[in-house]
Amino acid sequence: MKRISRGRFLRTMGAAGVAGSTLSVLACQPNTSAQSGGGGGGPEEKALNFYNWADYVAESTVPDFEKQTGIKVTQDFFSSNEDLLAKLQAGGTGYDVIVPSDYMVAIMIKSDVVQKLDMAQIPNSKNVGKEYKGLSYDPNNEYSLPYQWGTTGILYNKKEIGQLPESWDPLWDTEFEGEMSMLNDTRETLGAALYKLGYSVNATDQGQLEEAKAELKKQNPLLRGYFDSTEARPLVQNGDLLLGHVFSGDAFLALSENEDLDYVIPKPAATRWTDNMCIPNGAEHPQNAHKFINYILDAEVGAELSNYTYYATPNEAALPMIDDALKKLPTYSPTQEQFERLQVIEDTGEVTREYERIFTEVKSS
Amino acid sequence: MRERVAKGWSAGLAALLAPVTLWLGLFFLIPLLIILVYSFGTSGIYGGITLGFNPGNYLKVFDPLYLEIIVRSFGIAALTTLICFLLGYPLAYFIVFKGRRWRNALILLVMVPFWTSLLIRAYAWVVILGGNGIANKTLQFLGITDGPVNLIFTPEAVLMGMTYSYLPFMVLPLYAALEKFDVRLKEAGKDLGASRWQTFVRVTFPLSLPGVIAGSILVFIPSAGEFVIPDLLGGSQTVMTGNLIQNQFLQSRDWAFGSALSVLLAVLLLGAIMFYVRRIGSDKLEGV
Amino acid sequence: MAATTTKGSRKGTTSGLPDWGLLLGSVLVYLFLYAPIAVLIFFSFNSTRSTQVWTGFSFEWYGQLLSDPTILQAFRTSLTVGVFATLIATVIGTMTALALSRHRFRGQTAADTAIYAATVMPEIVVGVSLLVFFVAVGFELGITTIVIAHVAFTISFVTIVVRARLAGMDRSVEEAAQDLGASPVQTFFRVTLPLILPGVMAGGLLAFTLSFDDFVITYFVSGVGSSTLPLKIYSMIKFGVSPVINALSTVVLVATLFLIFGGSRLLVRKENA
């Protein structure tokens, strides 16, 4: 056993002590988060923490807001609705505006993660088209206002396989074996099977779910894989795939670059989804948050946004300013009949786990 | 002559171990305890946990679907480790013994690609292995195939992706272990009449064993928990434990079950390591 | 005297394996490692927002790199976190490796197990539990929490790598130094450390790489305004990763390669006499 001198020992212990106290000092930083917002109270500091999907704002959206209001915006990014929820639930606070999708808004309302909006501070809410308000996940728009919306359908190579019927059957057609893909999204893919069978995308009946599972298992060997929409798009553009289950924004992007492609919203039903702006509980700058939401709902800002993202705008006042090239694309502004085909994905509570298990089983087979 | 290894506790030992004890104690052990507690809790429908004693989460693991996934993951992890070893050892050997003055540059060059996001490198592989990609075009050019072949979105592609992703975890420990190698020992072997291959098998390789063990562990463990590669390069058709656990925390919002799965995975992996280390003989780890 | 079989010339033969085979194999592995790099550099010049479908040549994304502040900010954050986490983890990891390699003590198995255990938990579990922990103790989320988390999950990797270096190490020089009257600390800094430096650097390299591209853990423990590059990149999955990332990666790659070859005087070892 080596013995060390007393001096050395003390010095080493001292170093450890310094490290330890540094750590405790760091730990004692003032906890400025998790104060309740409420929208009232004194003047807020001129800051806003915006938690969004990456690249979901036009280049000028945030800088223009900063110029107009003098409020400094900090942008952070999440990569899925579930990530967003998990982080907020585990205590990750500090965000003022978040952008969850429809079913997630419902979940957040039920688990008390978001706060009510003060419509008096959002006069531009009148710009939102009536088809995009009062949807099942937030019937009176007490907690959310729509940001962008879209549909989920089939992007396919019209040149190679001709005009497709507006149906889900082609995705089960053995002729296209190995050249099709479905979304790596439980609700959307299970939803496609449910739609095909004529059921609701929010089915909870065990029998219906079993049928849907059987359909997906039948389809599994025919697929190239289950992809994100953004992965499927280049594969269809490249010719690696003939048909891809995608979101409308990706379809519109592909269509505008490649005339050989086409996009359909199948019958008897398909999904419409909406991304929304919400204010989480504990937001530090709720007044600024309201200002920002109001700003987004401005006609010009809304048009700029949608012209950049290629997703459709729920902002009726913005519609005239959308690029013509976009407006011409099939289903960009769906007809009444097409609208009636669209269903909204809702939270299915406990049955969600059953859905997930089914999808895992299908993918594993 | 002094002993090589100091026996028993001393202030020096305590000082050396203090930082890691503090850091891991606070920032690993406590969170681990949280997870252990969670694994016995009951998940709320929308995430979150009610604490309590519910061993049911562990029973849920014994579902053939989940067991199949776990077994598959371990299999892929083992294969990945093997391939990484076969590719990584010659490379590490080359860098240490043939690289000479360029050793540092060469080892850095191995790591540089990994400072770009895995995501874009995976997308690049999709391009390379796609129907119209370079790989297929080369195969057709060489006459090996007639038309495009499915190279991507297959289980093989997943294996390739895993190997690609974890190669540095094998190369770095091997490099570290080989780097100390005393050239004189090899020359002594040769002077005594051993062939180059014999020198390698009898002298070099055994002394590099600690690096092989370290590399194997550092590849096997994260491979078993991988979830990005199976989705990006496998078309999400190869479901691994990592995917399963991610799914439990995110889409299924079943934190309790997810925690139980994680604890189980951790115990299995730890068991595998201990078995592996003991089998090789822990003295080899010290090379004594 | 047994016959020796050698391939190639005897001159400068310090290896036990054929030279040309090793060289070829190594080149192939480097090609394997860099193939996707070549592709991603290629697509950084794409004229549309695709990283997989080539449509034409353009410098657009390099321009955007300069005009989009969030990307460079994210890069800066990643670098800052990476450097701090690596320094701390490397120091602590090396100390731990020394302790475990050169001592036999009660509780050693527990210590060994703990080190391995710190590598076996899945990332999402580490992320969520750390977040819960930080919130419970009132620790504000930000760069500090990210660094803390990164150190926590990389220490073990450094320890394991450095132990591989220490195992079976020839201690005669160290012993000679001590025989000549050097104190343990002096011996460490003047003799041991220079000897094991490449191993320590290998550990540090691994730690940095783990930190720089980490997503899941970082996502959960990051606070407002502390987005790292992976957070931004993974968030782009919804709309497609823009070639801006390719452009950034290309710039980083080129700069790093420049440093490696330009600073070769520092990196190129002096040949031992």
Image (cartoon, rainbow, N blue to C red):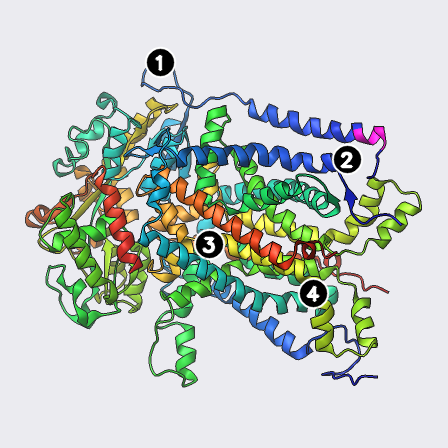
Q: Amino acid at mark 2?
A: Ser
The residue at 36%/53% (across/down) is B67
Residue stretch in magenta = A5-9
Q: Disc 3 marks which amino acid? A: Ala
Q: Which quadrant holds residue A63? A: top left
Which percent across, then down, holds residue A271? 17, 48
Closest to the camera, between mark 2 and mark 3, is 2
The amino acid type found where label 1 is placed reads Gly
Q: x, y percentage for residue A357? A: 27, 49
Q: Alpha-carbon distance for marks 1 and 3? A: 51 Å
Q: Report helix, strand or loop for mark 2.
A: loop
Residue B10's disc is 2
- Dot 4 or dot 3: first in sequence order is 4
Q: Nearer the viewer, mark 4 or mark 3?
A: 4
Q: Is residue C168 left or right of residue C75?
A: right
Residue receiving disc 4: B206
* Residue B250: mark in rendering: none
Q: Label 1, on which residue?
A: A41
Q: Earlier in the sequence, mark 4 or mark 2?
A: 2
